[in-house]
Image (spheres, rainbow, N blue to C red):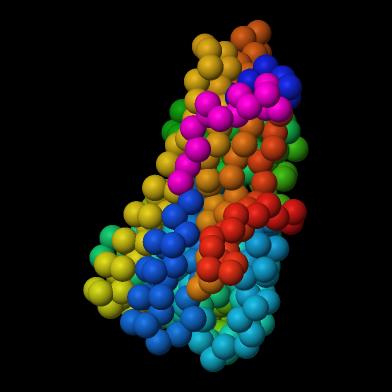
Amino acid sequence: MPTTRTKDSKSRKNGAAARFKQPPVLFDKTQTMIKKIQERLGGKLLTYWNGPRGSVCHSDVTALFKLLEHIGMQEKIFIFIKSDGGNGRAALRMVNLIRRYCQRLVALVPLECASAATMIALGAEDIQMGAIAYLTAVDTSLTHDLSPIDRDNDRVSVSLDEVKRIINLWRKNENATRDMNPYHALFQHIHPLVIGAVDRADSLSLMLCEEILSHHIQDQGRRSEIAATLNSKYPSHAYPILINEAKKIGLNALPMDPDVASLLLDLNHLYSEMGQKATTDISDTESHSNEIINILEREGCQIYFQQDKDWFYRTEERRWIVLNDASGWHQAIRRKGKVAQESLYL
C-alpha cells in the first residue's frame, strides 16, 4: 500500500521533505537511448510508459500535446507503449491527437500493452511486437460508487462479462428451477445500478474500438469484427494476445527488429528505475509516496507525473486516506546546456 509523508504542511516548510525518498530523473540517459532508437527506426519516436501504479488517463492527453506541438507534421511516428491500461476514452483522445501529426502511426510493443493501452495500439497501421510482448482484451470493468467492498474496504471493479457468466452458469445448472430468478440472488451482492452502468460501459468500449480503428481501416464490417472479438471473445480480461493471435484477429501485427526490441528494453529499464517505488514509512499508520508513475518523452523533452502525498491509515474504516497531496506533472528539458526540471500545470 502507498505511504505517507508528515503530519502537517509545516513540516514541509521546515525541510522535513528532505528525508523522504526521491526517485531519480534519468533525462540524459533516456535521451541517449531515444536518439539511438530513432536512428535505427529512421523516424520520430514518442514514448508512453506507465509504472505499476500508473494508468492511461485524460491528463496524459495534455502532456502528449505538449510533446507533439513542437515536432510538427511527420510522415511517420513510432510510439513505444508500455502500460497495464486505464481509461478507454483517454486512449481514443490520445490516438486522435497523434494522428493529427502523422500520416502513418507505428506502435512499438516490447512488453505489456494491456486493456486501454491495447486500444492505443489499435490506432496504428502497424503493431510491432517483441518476443515477450502481448496485447489483451478490452472488455470493460467498472468501479462504481455502489460496487461491492473487498476485505480492505475498497470498492471492487465489476465486469459485464463476469456478470453474464454468472447468469449463464445459473441457467445451465440442472438443479435450478424455472421459477428461480438469478438476478434476485445477484442483486444481494451487486447493486442493480452497477450492473446497468457496466452494461453501458461495455457498449462504450465497442464504440471506442471501432472509432479508433476507423483511422486506418475503412471497412466497417472488419472494424466491428475486431472490436467484438477484443470485447467478448476472451474468458479473461488479462488473457495475453500474442503476435499470432493478434494476426488472427485481423491486426497488422509484425515481429519487431531484435535490435530495436533490445534498445526498447534498455529504455524500459531506465524508466523502471525512475518509476521505482519511492515510499517512506513514518509509522504504522503514516507514510509518504514520491513515486513517478507515468512518463512521456520525445527527443529533447521528458514529461512525467510524480506522486507527492501523505497517506494515513484510518483504522476504524480499514483504509488508507490521502493527505497533503502535492502530486503533479513535471518536465525535464535542456536549457542553455543544462537539464532543467520544471513543474507543469496541466
Query: In terms of depth relative to the viewer, which is nearer, 74 or 185?
Result: 74
Residue 180, horizontal then vertical, whole percent: 61, 29
Q: Quadrant of the C terminus?
A: bottom right
Residue 93 lies in the magenta stretch? no
Can you name the residue that lies furthest to the front here? 336
Question: Residue at point 35% right, 66% down?
Answer: 264
Residue 23 lies in the magenta stretch? yes
Compared with 288, 127 (above or below) is below
Q: Quadrant of residue 177?
A: top right
Question: Residue at point 57% right, 13% down?
Answer: 285
Residue 201, horizontal then vertical, whole percent: 68, 53
Residue 20 seen in this snapshot: yes
Compared with 126, 61 (above or below) is above
Identify the magenta region: 11-24
Query: In terms of depth relative to the viewer, which is nearer, 280 or 313?
Result: 280
Residue 319, horizontal then vertical, whole percent: 61, 19
Question: Residue at point 61% right, 63% down?
Answer: 91
Compared with 157, 120 (above or below) is below
